[in-house]
Amino acid sequence: MKTITIATLAAAATLAMNVPAQASDFDGAYVTLKGGMDHTKASGSYQAEKKNVGAGGAELGYRWDVGHGLLLGADTFFDYDARARHDTAAGGTTKYGSNVYGADFTAGTVIATKLYVYGKLGGAHVKGIDEASGFARNAMHYGIGAAYEVAPRWTVGAEYTDTRAKEHGNRLNNDNVMLTVSYQFGSVFR
């Protein structure tokens, strides 16, 4: 099944390369589903080893083509960083994960033929789950990413985001690396 999925995406990407993209191809409303890995770390009273865990999320946003190949936008997002057992310095284990949600401003450009590269900066609310359920804090959220148009209105891509929340000497850090699939609804405000 995995081989069929990869072959289908490769064939779609090859066919889509024949028509150059413009910034307006990425203009408008979009929805994104994400899945990948979170490199999580806790310190303070939640002190535990760093660990890679599964992560998933969704994003809803809007981009405006402001000319010269530049797109500016805003999004709202939700990321789930899976619960996992982490070794503690005291020799035991603790099980925790986190939910992260917030909003970002985005800026990007189309390069090559159908490749959109972007950065994002915004705010997030980080809420610990399981044994870190007492942790809830606002933090800065930032990241970079790239999306490739594989068919009209459809993109696949990769994104890195980081959130480092701190509260009374306790920290909960999430470094997410996600694969993305997006659907472009197109421009609503013309």
Image (spheres, rainbow, N blue to C red):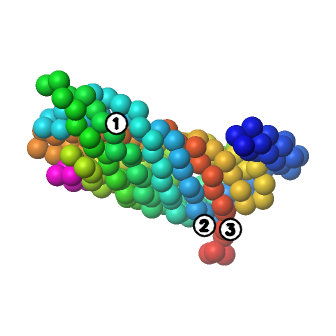
Q: Residue 129 at x, y = what percent?
A: 27, 51
Distance from disc 2 to disc 1, alpha carbons, whole Å, reads 31 Å
Residue 182 in view of the camera:
yes
Q: Which residue is mark 1?
A: 40
Few, some or many residues within 10 Å of mark 3 (<14, 14–19, 20+): some
- Label annotation for residue 186: 3
The three-letter code of the residue at mark 3 reads Gly
Is label 2 in contact with label 3 (beta carbons under 8 Å)?
Answer: yes
- Label annotation for residue 172: none
Mark earlier in primary sequence (2, 1) = 2
Q: Height in image: 168 above or below 137?
A: above
Q: Which residue is mark 2?
A: 29
- Residue 137: say if magenta: yes
Position of the C terminus by quadrant: bottom right
Q: Secondary structure at mark 3?
A: strand
Q: Secondary structure at mark 2?
A: strand
Q: Secondary structure at mark 1?
A: strand
Few, some or many residues within 10 Å of mark 2 (<14, 14–19, 20+): many
Q: Residue at x 30, y 36 (%)?
A: 85
